Amino acid sequence: MTVSDYHIPVMLSESIDALGLNEESIVVDLTFGGGGHSNEIVKRLGFNGMLYAFDQDLDAKNQLIDHQNLTFSLSNFRHFGRWLEYYERLKVDAVFADLGVSSWQIDVEQRGFAFRFNEGMLDMRMNPSAGFTASDVVMRYSQSDLVSVFSEYGEVRNSKALASAIVDVRGKWNNEVSIPLFNALLDKKYIGDRNRYFSQVYQALRIEVNDEMGALKDMLIQVEKYLKPGGVFAVLTYHSLEDKLVKNVMRSGNIDGKDDKDDFGNSLNPYKRKGPKYLEPTEEEVAINNRARSAKLRVVERR
């Protein structure tokens, strides 16, 4: 399988150009995925350059190319700081993250990410060795917890009615919930556009299963420590929840987006914006890769 089969990299040239690399750059790609961005990064590195790439999905490791400038760690990006210290690489020139789900994960029905399949189980684990699945969320969570997941992570308008319907019917289900079985329930409860509703519900379950918001917060607050002054931090986001966190950290240096100041009234934000507020994909790219349609590229420089 080629990289393009696995995942079409979004805003490839814009992302890599924004990093401002030279042949000796030390770079971190927090989301290796299919390797599209990483492969472009290593092309720009010379003998003394190095790319440290991370991904928690074993399938991503199978996409690796053998390159002297690439060191891969099979790990959730929330732990990247520990790995950099293990490699004795305490400061880097650039950090990049593409927060999108790889096309391979979405397109393989056994991974249970997509509602369009007619078979397979609700799974959605980005790390297949993790024990907790989307089926477990549906079967085990209390009604109030389900409401919280659907409303907070999916902005599902009738989250209370959906959670109530799940609790009412799941006693008749087996321990594992299949995609067709779950979709049959959603077909009775959706409001508005069907595809949008299903996407919101599936997104909410995926975020919960993988603790995406928790992992993202853990990652974001570490970058400042390992990025050199003048170093670049670039992130591709795809939905409002993750984009808000990224924007807050880049704008203020903290998760809450609070502009802290020192005793003299100077901002303590360790970053300054590089370029516009954000970049979006071109119409031509979206026409080729529809999954790029909601992407935003935000870029800052370490003070």
Image (tube, rainbow, N blue to C red):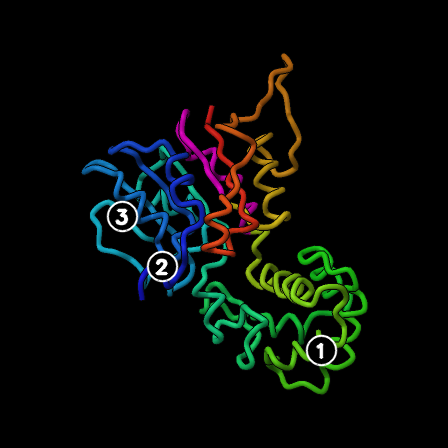
Residue identifier under label 1: 185
Residue at 49% x, 28% y: name it: 275
Q: Is residue 78 visible?
A: no
Q: Residue at x 51, y 46 (%)?
A: 283
Instruction: Return the residue nearer the eye: 266 or 243.
Output: 243
**Residue furthest left in the image:** 47
Kind of residue sitting beneath label 3:
Leu
Q: What is the x, y in percent for residue 199?
A: 63, 63
| Residue matched to label 3 | 70
Residue 225, image x, y percentages: 45, 34
Q: Is residue 153 visible?
A: yes
Q: Of the residues shown, which amino acid type is indicated by label 2?
A: Ser
Residue behind mark 2: 4
Q: From mark 1 to mark 2, how far is it between C-alphas?
A: 35 Å
Query: Horizontally, is 240 left or right of 102 in the view?
Result: right
- Mark closest to the chain's N terminus, 2 or 3: 2
Task: Give the residue displayed 55% in from the left and 69% down from the top.
Answer: 114
SS class of the residue under badge 2? Answer: helix
**In the image, what residue type sits under mark 1?**
Leu
Residue 229 belongs to the span the image colors magenta? yes
